[in-house]
Image (cartoon, rainbow, N blue to C red):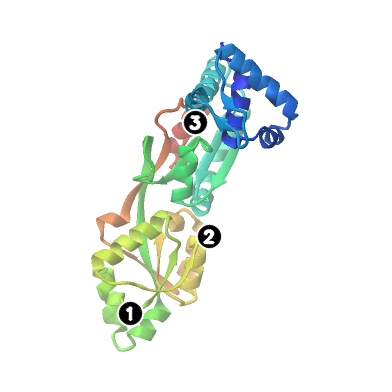
Amino acid sequence: MINFLNLEYFLVAAEELNFTKAARKLFISQQSLSTHISHIEKELGVVLFNRTSPMTLTYAGQVLKSRARQLLELKDETCQELADIKDFSRGQLTIGVSHTRGRMILPEILPIYREQFPGIDLKLIEGNSSTLADDLLHGRVDLIIDMMPFKVENVETIPICQEEILLAVPEAILLQYFPDRLEEIKNQLANHVDLSLLSQCPFLLIHQGNRVRTIADELFEEAQFSPNIVLETENIETVLALAMKGMGITFYPRMFISGHREFQEKLSKKAPVTFYSLGYEKAHRVLAIGCHKGHYMPQAAKEFIRIAKETL
């Protein structure tokens, strides 16, 4: 039977193809690592490394490397499942979410979760849609919260609520570009947003890879014009703050406004920006929680999903 510790050490050595670097990464001596590798070779009855310079994997080593991570993940999942069955009093849950969406959603979920399951160690990883998808794919997070469809395969999705992307248009921009048609343009936008009408106006957009930017790019393509982008940033709150200063038009999720009462009151008092419903199917998305379809879902994750569905 393979010793899992030996297997873990083999995998690091196989990835590094250098015992000195691998030992340093594992915080053990090179001699200790060599002993572990010798043990696993003895257990399996094969040679795993060509101890040449540079060192390479034998065919047996290549086969084991291709399976080692799967075996270790299966071991971890089995232990987690058994621990859940035995006693759901301790555990860990890592959630991936964008910074802004986390600020709006998590305060509604986490206090309830913490009260019900105080022994679960909660961790957050923040990033854009592409980063979060990669984190889920490589097992760095247990769950991600994002708009559907997710940018990764083998994901099971649990719909939570509806979300709509709005067009945020500063009054100052309309005054600058349509000084003699201000009310006419505002009425047109209120009745039906035709983005081509704003083709000469400046736009503030978040970087590509974010779901809101993807929707914006799709809408520009459908309107058949390339936007005049004056600034791109990773933070969606930054683009709205700049739009409120009259720097450009942007896109903003309705949830981020309606979910933040103080911010909504601030907007209504200043009123430097008007939000318009785009009227496009692509602007309407379902907010969902995603988990890796091929991995065991721990009880901690199941309970988080339950509370999210009941709360949002």
- Find the distance from the CA under tag 2 to the CA under tag 3: 31 Å
Q: For the point 28% across and 72% down, which residue is it?
A: 225
Q: Amino acid at mark 3?
A: Ala
Q: Is residue 3 visible?
A: no
Disc marking residue 200: 1
211 relative to 200, above or below: above
Disc 3: which residue:
301
Disc marking residue 77: none
Q: Would you call the spot at circle 1 few (<14 residues within 10 Å), some (14-19), or many (20 or more)?
A: few
Q: Nearer the viewer, mark 2 or mark 3?
A: 3
Q: Is residue 9 visible?
A: yes
Residue 119 in picture, x, y percent from top left: 63, 28
- Say if mark 2 contacts mark 3, CB within 8 Å: no
Give the quadrant of residue 198: bottom left
Q: For the point 50% across and 60% down, which residue is it?
A: 234
Q: Amino acid at mark 1?
A: Gln
Q: Give the mark nearer the N terminus: 2 vs 3.
A: 2
Circle 1 sits in a helix, a strand or a loop, which is it? Answer: loop
Q: Give the mark nearer the N terminus: 1 vs 3.
A: 1
Q: Residue furthest front?
A: 52
Q: Amino acid at mark 2?
A: Glu
- Find the distance from the CA under tag 1 to the CA under tag 2: 33 Å
Pick the front one: 88 or 231: 231
Disc marking residue 262: 2
Q: Nearer the viewer, mark 1 or mark 2?
A: 1
Residue 104 in picture, x, y percent from top left: 50, 51
Q: Would you call the spot at circle 2 few (<14 residues within 10 Å), some (14-19), or many (20 or more)?
A: few
